[in-house]
């Protein structure tokens, strides 16, 4: 009975995630090669969503952990109202405009991993992402948004990006947003093995550097013993950058549920729906119990990484010799 209830809960999460994925695919769609840069004006992101009814659960604790139907609908409503300016002057800095930042979560060392929007789309943001990556002396590029052919086509008009392809220090895997599919599991494995054999620091990007980049970062952060609050904070930083979210706003809490769903996938659970880690009686907000171990299991069982590869990946991210 417990397995049946868990399955019912997970099916509900899949439907909501599919609606969210549909939004992000529209939101993060690539600019066709050769297309003129977009006009410098604000645009409103719209998404079609479907209401999902919660499956009744007998376990009171489990029911309390689920995101309420009301909150799910509110989250979808917030996504429909997101407004992102394409003008640099509307942002506090170049890094926020390009959603560029170094990833240092848990025990991750400095100078290993950066994330950003796409640095080769010939749009308003790309030159900023490329310049910041160049200043960080990025050694390899991980492109989650393009196929190898699409990556080569974009790079053909941007010499800086082309140099990574020429030197063999780039990978393009064209992930989609169904993170738990066999297709994406194979792509994640390809990315992680690339990291073990190529030059650091790495620049990880999709189109906006939110969903696909966010999921890969979560996997790596969990492996490096980062706490749930820390992981969600980094995921939500993209929304702070693009939309000026404040942590005290209700919309921050609501949209963080999408990040919670990603963590639940790594843990092999249905969504817990709470943007904060479970706290011990003394108020500790450290790593969620078992999150690192669950990340290791996820990498072994779903991504099919060997134990030695996982250990080498951990050492790489810690700034040690893999």
Image (tube, helix red, strand yellow):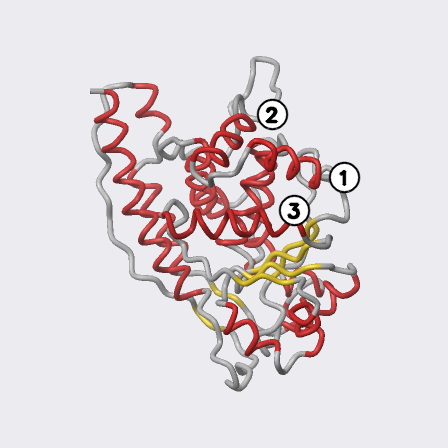
Sort mark 2 into few (<14), some (14-19) or many (20+) by Cα contacts within 10 Å: some
Q: Which mark sits nearer the N-terminus, 3 or 2? A: 3
Q: CA distance from mark 3 to mark 2?
A: 31 Å
- 280 to the left or right of 141: left
Q: The C terminus is located in which quarter?
A: top right
- Label 1 secondary element: loop
Q: Which residue appears at 72% of the width and 55% of the height?
A: 199
Q: Is residue 151 left or right of residue 22?
A: right
The residue indicated by pointer 3 is: 196
Q: Residue furthest top?
A: 281
User: In the rendered image, which quarter contains the N terminus?
Assistant: top left
Relative image position of residue 104 (x, y in whole percent): 70, 42
Instruction: Tell me where residue 37 sits by quadrant.
Output: bottom right
Estimate the x, y position of residue 230 in percent, counting from the top left: 61, 36
Tell which of 251 and 160 is nearer to you.
160
Q: Against 194, is 232 above or below? A: above
Q: Residue at x 58, y 47 (%)?
A: 192
* Figure check: 121 above or below 60: below
Q: Earlier in the sequence, mark 1 or mark 2?
A: 2
Circle 2 — which element? loop
Residue on which the image places disc 1: 321
Residue linked to disc 2: 285
Q: Position of residue 284 (x, y in %)?
A: 62, 20
Quarter occupied by residue 125 = bottom right
């Amino acid at each position: 009975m417990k397995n049946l209830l868990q399955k019912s809960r997970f099916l509900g999460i899949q439907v909501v995630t599919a609606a969210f994925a549909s939004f992000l695919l529209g939101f993060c769609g690539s600019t066709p090669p050769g297309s003129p840069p977009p006009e410098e004006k604000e645009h409103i992101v719209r998404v079609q969503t479907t209401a999902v009814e919660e499956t009744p659960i007998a376990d009171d604790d489990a029911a309390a952990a689920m995101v309420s139907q009301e909150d799910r609908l509110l989250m979808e409503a917030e996504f429909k109202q997101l407004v992102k300016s394409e003008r640099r002057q509307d942002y506090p800095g170049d890094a926020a405009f390009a959603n560029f930042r170094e990833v240092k979560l848990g025990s991750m060392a400095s100078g290993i991993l950066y994330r950003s929007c796409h640095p080769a789309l010939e749009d308003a943001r790309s030159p900023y992402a490329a310049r910041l990556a160049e200043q960080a002396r990025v050694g390899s590029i991980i492109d989650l948004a393009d196929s190898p052919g699409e990556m080569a086509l974009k790079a053909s008009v941007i010499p800086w990006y082309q140099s990574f392809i020429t030197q063999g220090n780039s990978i393009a895997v064209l992930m989609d947003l169904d993170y738990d599919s066999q297709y994406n599991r194979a792509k994640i494995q390809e990315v992680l093995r690339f990291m073990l054999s190529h030059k650091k620091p790495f620049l990880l990007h999709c189109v906006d550097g939110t969903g696909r980049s966010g999921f890969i970062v979560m996997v790596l952060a969990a492996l490096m013993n980062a706490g749930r609050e820390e992981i969600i904070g980094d995921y939500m930083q993209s929304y702070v950058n693009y939309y000026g979210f404040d942590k005290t706003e209700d919309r921050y809490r609501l949209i963080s549920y999408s990040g919670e769903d990603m963590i639940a996938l790594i843990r092999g659970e249905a969504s817990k729906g709470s943007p904060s880690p479970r706290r011990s009686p003394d108020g500790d907000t450290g790593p969620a119990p078992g999150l690192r171990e669950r990340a290791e299991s996820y990498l072994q069982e779903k991504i099919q990484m060997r134990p030695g590869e996982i250990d080498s990946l951990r050492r790489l991210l810690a700034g040690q010799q893999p």
